[in-house]
Amino acid sequence: MRRAVALAALSPLPDANPRVGCVIVSTDGSVLAEGYHRGAGTPHAEAATIAQANADGVDLRGATAYVTLEPCAHQGRTPSCARALVAAGVARVVYGQGDPNGAAAGGAGILADAGIAVEQDAELARQGAALNEDWTFSVTHARPVVRWKFAATLDGFSAAADGTSRWITGSTARADVHRLRAQHGAVVVGTGTALADDPQLTVRDTDGTNLPTQPLRVVVGDRDLPADARVLDDAAETLQLRTHDVDAVLEVLHERGIHAVWLEGGPTLAAAFLAAERVDEVLAYVAPAMLGAGRPAAADFGAASMTDLRRFDLVDVTSLVTPADATTPAQTDLRLTLRPLATREES
Amino acid sequence: MRRAVALAALSPLPDANPRVGCVIVSTDGSVLAEGYHRGAGTPHAEAATIAQANADGVDLRGATAYVTLEPCAHQGRTPSCARALVAAGVARVVYGQGDPNGAAAGGAGILADAGIAVEQDAELARQGAALNEDWTFSVTHARPVVRWKFAATLDGFSAAADGTSRWITGSTARADVHRLRAQHGAVVVGTGTALADDPQLTVRDTDGTNLPTQPLRVVVGDRDLPADARVLDDAAETLQLRTHDVDAVLEVLHERGIHAVWLEGGPTLAAAFLAAERVDEVLAYVAPAMLGAGRPAAADFGAASMTDLRRFDLVDVTSLVTPADATTPAQTDLRLTLRPLATREES
């Protein structure tokens, strides 16, 4: 089971499909075949494992398959994995996370109906689900999860009054942003930010070079961007959505198979997502600095009184230390991770 | 030496005088007498210890005195402790923190001139000084240390747009404020805060009762307060300073023997202290919540561009967890402690 989880972790992120690993073991406990899903358009983990066994001339009859996600029931771009396991003649299937599309349509039933011993392992379920949090969210909510990232001073400003903002946080915090941004299918900003800051919105290595795989760049708003805007360069695909409807934005991205959105602001767009209650996680990079005035992290989203206070659970605090260099002293920024209160999410 | 430090920690805080402990030991290592300073107007630690020995009929000749602070040279409300030790006939004095008023005027010289063996112990110095940070600051800077406390949302608001602010932080964070407020000689607010929030500004126990010893309450600004303002009640002494000059405020408090000021805002007064570079430590209580609009923690203090960014060292992050109760979920606030960058302080 540990091997299946390790294999699943090799699956690409972000991707339209979940990360899945599979190990098929003989009755004497030896591994007959293993595989994982290499991304949308390639075989599922079970299919890849069975194909490997076939190529090696290994007979899977009577064997036990460990798979981190309930084998799929449906025939999509690839055949049903539950039916493939039946055809391969395995005697037992131990799976992890249940299919979030609903047990009724699940592959576990197909396997059981075929006389295969089927069990869900709780620990495998926990570990398998942990690898697919965003995919699971998007399946169950029919929209991508939204992570709002902002970097600000302790008093909540993301730029000075004249628009300058380089750099409020240290280089270690900025590298952390690139690392997390890379795990998202889309990076979203408003036209205001695109026009004011002219960001490239790509995922870069620590030496500043763009990584080979890039999230979709999304600019939300009606205003036209200049042809030489950096966000329109050929470093990655860019989509401009001429709408102010947060759910319309998420619907377009959901249809493109994007499970996680990295919302980078600016304040107006962040306020729109907050007002729509479409911020599922906040990544706040807080610098030990004050400005007293400037561009806020979030614009007014309509809170007039304490009864409108938007509360979150603080789920993580991480220190990000940038060492001193020749011109600047060391700087310790904080990354705070917050999630909407459960009561609010359930309401 | 450990006993001397433990005794010093019994001295009151806040107080006009430093916290000092003294232990006098015979040549065979047995304790002959011990004492500590019980606050301004009472005998110094050495005098208290010698008086105890006299009352017990103990002969101190040839003994060794351990004292956490260099014995005073000058005769003030109480006689010079260095001369008292000479008169008592001790043979050796081991002291901790050096007199920050300057070695030239120090008691160590008086002792050495009298033929007493005098040494400063580094570890005793460190521990003794740690008990008197605020006193030492005020002696060396000729003004009180200023700690600016604010409680705010993650986006920097201390109250909602309609002025409501109860409660942004949880009860655990608010109790922590009272605990720290109690260690200061004065609590300072602007007339704006006094008029808007009508705070009592006292130090209260967890059950809400006022403690017997209270910091001086100071209201800064020209506007008159209504006679029924809570800050004017008889729970503690209150001083209104009709000035906008930060250094004038600190001078008045320094002359009253106050070594540490707890600045509670509001935004205008905080901005004045920031602009004057008279904030020596920031205690930021940050709630995991957003408002998007409202009363900021600090008003505009003149920063127009990133070159005006006021940077601090983040020296501590403490989580303050308020458990859930019948009406509200659990809340984790953060207390961030920041100090001005050394480069700034030295400039």
Image (cartoon, coloured by chain):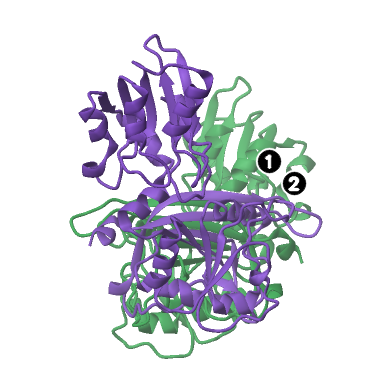
Chain colours: A green, B purple
Q: Which of the marked residues, 1 or 2, is nearer the chain's N terminus?
A: 1
Label 1 crowding class (10 Å Cα cut-off): few <14, some 14-19, many 20+?
many
Disc 1: host chain? A
Label 2 secondary element: helix
Instruction: Name the mark on residue A110.
Output: 2
Q: Visible in this render: residue A43?
A: no
Foreground residue, B24 or A241? Answer: B24
What residue is drawn where x is 43% and y is 55%?
B259
Q: Which residue is mark 1?
A: A86
How many angstroms separate mark 1 from mark 2 (CA)? 8 Å
Q: Is residue B288 visible?
A: yes
Q: Describe the element under mark 1 as helix, strand or loop.
A: helix
Q: Is residue A245 depicted above or below B124 in this figure?
A: below
- Quarter of the C terminus of chain B within the rendering: bottom left
Residue B93 on image: x %, y %: 32, 25
Mark 1 and mark 2 residues within 8 Å of each other at the beta carbon: yes
Residue A272's x, y, as percent?
Answer: 58, 79
